[in-house]
Amino acid sequence: MEQENANEKIEGKPRKRSQSCLVCLLCFATGFTLSLIGYTPFPLHTMPIEGTVVILDEHGEAIPFQPTTVTVFSRYASGILRSKWQTRNFSVDESGEFSRKIPEFAATLVFTTKDGKYAAVVDITPDMPPTGLTIELRPRYTVTGRLIHYDGTPLASQRIRLSYMRFGDFEKNLSFRITGRQSATVKELHTETTTTDSEGFFTINNVIPGIEYNLRNAWSVWNTREEHDFWVPSLEMPFLEPEQYQEPFDLGDMSVR
């Protein structure tokens, strides 16, 4: 009896190895098939980015370095599993220097001090080596404005959304080959929401100078048009002069349909 049990144990080992080999073969076959149709779950090639962060105050004078976080959004085409690797965060070294490797695609880097007061946004591309960078973080500020209908009527009690967005590249990837559609990733890298008052006036904090936002109804849904829906696609926030920091920057009347 003991000999029979021993034989069963010995005979059982090759079966487990065979199952493991089968799993490996299936994984290899899946990867090979995906590569044949031009799809990889994440980019294989990387490029270095490195530079120095400088923080400027309201007068444009450099101040001591503060803890800073970087959000990297790599703008390669979206696809199955890819979104998991598309956005990454890392911290800048205490010396103010940073060095990382990212996918070899165009990317957007958002630099923000941990207290949220200073920020900067940089776009980089593989054809211009993203090394030796000097990133100047400037103070965020507050903006005010008034939302009105094109006929001059104030839009009261409107929940609005100020967003800084980036789009991933379009690609005829796996979803296109199966469904006949192209796909792209949309990433909101900075968003602030507020509500207009009875006269249509609004206040929004923490805007990043030098970047282009869009303004829309906070309840609108992508690719749909709803009642009272609106879209202001290009709203560039200027770099302020020192005296302009004393009060919120006025965007004026914003007329929408």
Image (tube, rainbow, N blue to C red):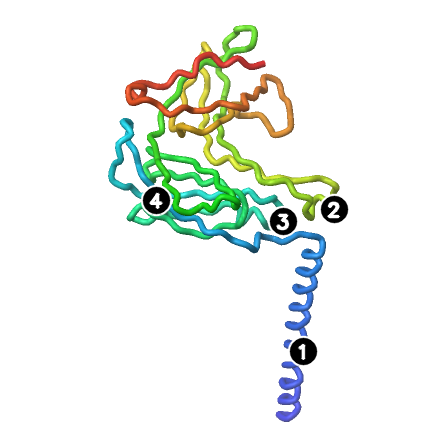
- Badge 3 amino acid: Ile
Residue in view at x 49 percent, y 25 percent: 161
Question: Which mark is in front, 3 or 4?
Answer: 4
- Badge 2 amino acid: Ile
Dot 2 alpha-carbon crowd within 10 angstroms: few under 14, some 14 to 19, many 20 or more:
few
Dot 4 alpha-carbon crowd within 10 angstroms: few under 14, some 14 to 19, many 20 or more:
some
Callout 4: SS:
strand
Q: Quadrant location of the N terminus?
A: bottom right
Image position, residue 234 (x, y; %): 52, 23
Image position, residue 81 (x, y; %): 59, 50
**Is 174 on the left or on the right of 201, as rendered?**
right
Question: Which mark is in front, 2 or 4?
Answer: 4
**Label 1 sits on residue:** 15
Q: Earlier in the sequence, mark 1 or mark 2?
A: 1
Dot 1 alpha-carbon crowd within 10 angstroms: few under 14, some 14 to 19, many 20 or more:
few
Callout 2: SS:
helix
What is the CA distance from the residue labelled 1 to the residue labelled 2?
36 Å
**Label 2 sits on residue:** 178
- Badge 4 amino acid: Thr
Which of 91 and 8 lies nearest the eye of the viewer? Answer: 91
> Are the residues at dot 1 and dot 4 in contact (C-beta closer than 8 Å)?
no
**Label 3 sits on residue:** 80
**Label 4 sits on residue:** 52
- Badge 1 amino acid: Arg
What is the CA distance from the residue labelled 1 to the residue labelled 4?
57 Å
Question: Which mark is in front, 1 or 3?
Answer: 3
Residue in view at x 61 percent, y 44 percent: 78
Q: Earlier in the sequence, mark 1 or mark 3?
A: 1
Residue in view at x 40 percent, y 30 percent: 208
